[in-house]
Image: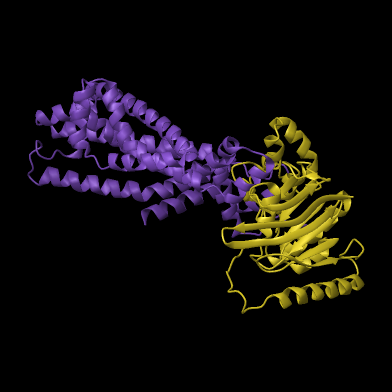
Chain colours: A purple, B yellow
């Protein structure tokens, strides 16, 4: 309700500022002019994109605000001890007070997450390519990989720390354990989704297996890969925190553990908020990279939007 | 001068006999069509020619046994890569042949106007209409400058109106270039409009049941007189095809390649 009103308000503002040259007419015009037929996002496109983003985000922001308000009211007037359930305002205040310690413990978590995820990504790519070239390897590997996903992290994390110490290595291994599989499966499925006719045509052109992999199978796997990436990147921070929880010198995981042991749920929750923000940022980064890596997907959706307004030009003469 | 020559080409997939002795030839600068019911093994024949599969029988090109890269192949549907811009789709064959991307682009760019794609070099395939996509696919095929074009039902996926327009366009293009071309189709009208000669195949196992010359003058889209003659040839071919289709002899396999 409120979001719709907000969107309407923004649209009204925009039309009052800019002369009425809406996106609709820009799309109609665009294909007629050669060379520049790709509708570039001008300042107007940018502003309307911001408006759309706000309209889209409003419900999420609203529901979160309502949740926090309810929590605040309950914690404040419900006669609950702050050592049991601290109010969000208290969490925020305490987080600000211990910001130095939080930051100090966040950095190792970030570097562990990034290092672990990078290793996992590399391994997923190399192994998926190998499996694509050697189908027998797939039959040998997949049962082990699926079994690896059944290991309970709670049990395996202390063991990995026991074997590999308190350094970066056990964290990389644990992050790889939880993030590797979705990307590997996505890539393998993506290769298989290559259009048969494209492969046939490349073979008829004289391309060998490696060429076909590089020119057709790998790009075909991109949408699948990014779907897997978005799933697994949300596991990465959790994996890092689990690894630190089991044993580390510094990091959000060990920080949460010691805060809990000191009866400071407000600081535990502050660390949780930081880790959520981290995950959200990584997810956003993944979406951004996908947009940059696959510009043709944007073109597709733009064309789809254009089609229900007008028949695209270009079929002037057949 | 005969370029492609097939003598008694056969192919079985296990117990399934697909091609039961196909003999045909294509002369230089000639447009030949292979017309047959769905599932007759037309695409199998193209796979044999491009070397994707092996069969029995004799396949010769310019008198020598068929080897390697003689054909530029245009598959069913357009097989444009959605992640490459139109110009990079067009250069694909040249790049596979080892040409640098930049040189390939320079070679291809002047041809965009003739294919009705001027101004769309930097567009993504998803931004093109169905007819434009087919023209881009044909451009990608002919720039390879191979000895012969293999067209596998190139307009099968288009709507009827766009298909008719594309057939006329291809006829015009062929008149100015005189490519040696072999077209697979199950569209009788398309075959008559485009071809110098038509080989009519039987249902599976496929054999050549008749060879029809199309002596109509070009361009073929002009007069009503021509249209009448074309209609007569079409009717003859249809009779041959439908006379063959005995619904009791084989169950419909529903192949819709």
Could you tell me which residue is drawn at 79 percent across and 58 percent down? Answer: B24
Choose between A281 and A189: the one closer to the eye.
Answer: A189
Whether residue A241 appears in this view of the structure is yes
On the image, the x and y values in percent for residue A259 come to 14, 29
On the image, the x and y values in percent for residue A173 come to 30, 29
On the picture, is A86 further left or further right than A244?
left
Furthest residue in direction bottom, as rendered: B248
Choose between A130 and B217: the one closer to the eye.
Answer: A130
On the image, the x and y values in percent for residue B247 come to 63, 78
Quadrant containing the C terminus of chain B in the rendered view? bottom right
Choose between B212 and B232: the one closer to the eye.
Answer: B212
On the picture, is A50 further left or further right than A300?
left
On the picture, is B26 further left or further right than B88?
right
Whether residue A22 appears in this view of the structure is no
Could you tell me which residue is drawn at 61 percent across and 37 percent down? Answer: A208
**Total numbered labels:** 0
Could you tell me which residue is drawn at 26 percent across and 25 percent down? Answer: A170
* Quadrant of the image occupied by residue B65: top right
Could you tell me which residue is drawn at 82 percent across and 64 percent down? Answer: B193
* Quadrant of the image occupied by residue A168: top left
């Amino acid at each position: 309700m409120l979001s719709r009103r907000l969107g309407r308000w923004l649209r009204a503002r925009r039309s009052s500022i800019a002369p009425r040259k809406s996106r609709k007419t820009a799309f109609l015009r665009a294909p007629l002019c050669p060379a520049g037929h790709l509708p570039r996002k001008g300042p107007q496109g940018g502003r309307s994109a911001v408006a759309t983003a706000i309209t889209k985000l409003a419900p999420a922001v609203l529901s979160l605000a309502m949740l926090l308000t309810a929590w605040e009211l309950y914690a404040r007037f419900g006669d609950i001890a702050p050592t049991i359930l601290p109010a969000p305002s208290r969490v925020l205040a305490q987080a600000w007070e211990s910001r130095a310690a939080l930051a100090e413990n966040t950095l190792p978590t970030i570097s562990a997450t990034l290092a672990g995820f990078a290793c996992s990504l590399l391994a997923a790519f190399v192994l998926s390519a190998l499996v694509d070239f050697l189908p027998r390897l797939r039959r040998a590997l997949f049962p082990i990989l699926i079994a690896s996903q059944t290991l309970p992290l709670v049990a395996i994390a202390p063991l990995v720390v026991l074997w590999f110490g308190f350094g970066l290595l056990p964290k990389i291994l644990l992050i790889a354990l939880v993030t590797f599989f979705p990307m590997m499966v996505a890539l393998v499925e993506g290769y298989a989704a290559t259009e048969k006719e494209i492969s046939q045509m490349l073979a008829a052109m004289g391309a060998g297996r490696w060429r076909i992999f590089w020119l057709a199978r790998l790009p075909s796997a991109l949408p699948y890969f990014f779907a897997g990436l978005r799933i697994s990147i949300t596991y990465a921070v959790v994996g890092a925190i689990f690894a630190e929880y089991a044993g580390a010198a510094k990091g959000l995981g060990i920080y949460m553990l010691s805060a809990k042991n000191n009866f400071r749920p407000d600081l535990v929750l502050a660390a949780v908020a930081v880790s959520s923000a981290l995950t959200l940022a990584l997810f956003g980064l993944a979406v951004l990279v996908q947009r940059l890596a696959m510009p043709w997907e944007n073109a597709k959706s733009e064309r789809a939007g254009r089609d229900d307004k007008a028949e695209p030009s270009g079929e002037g003469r057949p | 001068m005969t370029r492609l020559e097939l003598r008694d080409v056969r192919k079985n997939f296990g117990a399934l006999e697909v091609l039961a002795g196909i003999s045909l030839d294509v002369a230089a600068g000639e447009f030949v069509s292979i017309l047959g019911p769905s599932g007759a093994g037309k695409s199998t024949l193209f796979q044999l020619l491009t070397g994707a599969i092996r069969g029995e029988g004799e396949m010769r090109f310019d008198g020598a046994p068929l080897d390697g890269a003689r054909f530029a192949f245009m598959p069913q549907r357009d097989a444009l890569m959605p992640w490459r811009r139109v110009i990079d789709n067009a250069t694909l064959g040249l790049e596979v042949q080892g040409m640098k991307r930049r040189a390939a682009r320079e070679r291809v760019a002047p041809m965009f106007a003739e294919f009705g794609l001027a101004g769309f070099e930097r567009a993504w395939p998803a931004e093109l209409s169905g007819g434009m996509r087919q023209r881009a696919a044909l451009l990608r095929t002919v720039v390879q400058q191979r000895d012969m074009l293999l067209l596998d039902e190139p307009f099968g996926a288009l709507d009827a109106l766009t298909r008719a327009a594309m057939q006329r366009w291809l006829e015009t293009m062929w008149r100015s270039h005189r490519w040696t071309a072999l077209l697979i189709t199950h569209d009788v009208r398309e075959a008559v409009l485009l071809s110098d000669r038509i080989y009519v195949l039987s249902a599976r196992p496929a054999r050549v049941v008749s060879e029809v010359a199309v002596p109509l003058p070009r361009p073929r889209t002009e007069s009503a007189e021509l249209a009448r003659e074309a209609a007569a040839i079409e009717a003859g071919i249809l009779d041959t095809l439908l006379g063959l289709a005995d619904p009791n002899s084989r169950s419909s396999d529903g192949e819709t390649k």
